[in-house]
Amino acid sequence: MKKARVATMWLDACSGCHMSFLDIDEALLDVAPKIDLVYGPLVDAQEFPDDVDVCIIEGAIGNQDDVERVKRARERSRILVALGDCATTGNVPSMRNPIPVKTILERVYIEGAEGQKVIPTQGVPALMRHARPLHELVKIDLHVPGCPPPAPAILYVVSELLAGRIPDLKSKVRFG
Amino acid sequence: MSEQITMRIDGQVCTAKEGQTIIEVAQANGRYIPSLCHMPGLSADGCCRLCLVEVTGLNRLLPACTTPVRNGMSVVTDSERLNQNRLMALELLFSERNHICAVCVSNGHCELQGLAQQLGLTHIHFTYNYPKLPVDVSHPRFVLDHNRCILCARCVRVCDEVEGAHVWDIAGRGINSMLVSDLQRPWGESQSCTSCGKCVQVCPTGALVEKGHAVEEMTKRNAVVTQLAIKRGTHP
Ligand code: SF4
Ligand code: SF4
Ligand code: FES
């Protein structure tokens, strides 16, 4: 059987959803032979590859770089999964949204800093006005809320997707 | 003596007393209707729109918590149209203020969050509003976090109808509506608050909570308030 080409992506988030993925423990041994992990924080690939079957994204869209990466993932993937509350609702990264970006940066890098007081602009992507959930930018095929989604829910999602079905998550997951 | 009437809920024949609301009759007959602002023991308000039902012969949907039953009435509590409307009502509540369940003291015990799970809501179609809202920590024992308030007015009603203090009101109109204590004084300076905590117990979300709780730690006991209302005869 042809292996599914799977990518994962970590945007504005804490990596907890990736951790929860690894928490499926020994079930990873069943999943691993069925997939080719072609991109993500756990592999070396620098460029998002073409022809991806499933791309699982953790995190909100917080900066300009995230915007480009999500768009590319959408163009090159058949199924896009928003994994976790940051990806589905904005969650903790969106707690900055009621406050203007300039005010936050000044608070952290000027008022809050000891020694050098500069707002970094070189080598870091510019923050967007709001950290936003993925579906506000691109079409998402499956939302899996939770902070993080429990490992059994992730295993269920991955198993169903590998079997060629879109899982029915009704009542299986919740915000928070 | 109130008159006995006969009606149908999802096809099932039910007997009821005149003056009862659809949600009361449904509950007495084991039919579940989602609700949020409704709480047994308090007067009906009809502001959250979660409990909408179809009434045969009427095109518009009616709130089950405020609509009195009539003889011969036929009610549908479960349909695709109702489901869509309930989801929309929930999504509007989530998008209106800042609900960050993962860091909320009521995470795992919240009626809004619970309904979202139950109705299968996995994301919000509306653009979030992200208002900048205050948190009132002036009361020695309790906190009011406006970010989590859904304006269900349960606190307003319990304080007025059961405790008899009437500390709370909702000021403003539409999206600018805000819960206020004592004509917009900080809660801690309220002259009328008896610090009984009933408002905290009936609040369905993490808006009214006890101080000193971390994420997920705030649980509520609103059934106690219902029993108290029935005992005191304030139950409408
Ligand atoms: S009040 Fe309820 S819905 Fe709102 S953030 Fe807290 S747990 Fe979530
Ligand atoms: S504070 Fe709680 S009980 Fe009062 S209106 Fe807001 S959500 Fe309802
Ligand atoms: S429960 Fe009926 S409108 Fe809120």
Image: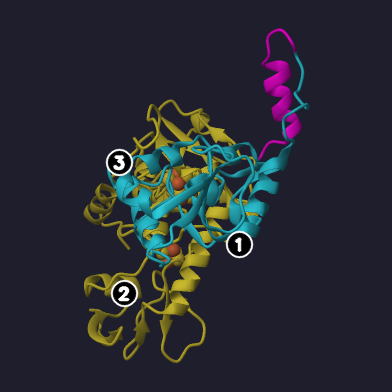
Chain colours: A cyan, B yellow
Residue B20: mark in rendering: 2
- Which amino acid type corresponds to the residue marked 3 in the rendered image? Asp
Task: Assign a secondary structure to mark 2.
Answer: loop
Residue B104 seen from this side: no
Q: Name the residue at 30% across, 80% down.
A: B18
The C terminus of chain A: image quadrant? top left
On screen, residue A130 above or below A124: below
Say whether disc 1 or disc 3 marks the residue closer to the N-terminus.
3
Task: Assign a secondary structure to mark 3.
Answer: loop
> What is the number of callouts on the image?
3
Residue B228 seen from this side: yes
Q: Answer yes or no: disc 2 within 8 Å of ligand 3.
A: no
On screen, residue B54 above or below A120: below
Which callout, 1 or 2, points to the residue nearer the camera? Answer: 1
**Chain designation of label 2:** B
- Which amino acid type corresponds to the residue marked 2 in the rendered image? Gln
Q: Residues within 10 Å of mark 1 (few under 14, many from 20)?
A: few
Residue A25: mark in rendering: 3
The magenta-colored residue range is: A98-116
In percent of width and height, residue A126 lies at: 74, 36
Q: What is the distance, in whole Å, between disc 1 and disc 2 at their CAs?
A: 46 Å
Q: Answer yes or no: disc 3 within 8 Å of ligand 1.
A: no
Q: Name the residue at 31% across, 83% down.
A: B10
Task: Assign a secondary structure to mark 1.
Answer: loop
Q: Nearer the viewer, residue A127 or B100?
A: A127
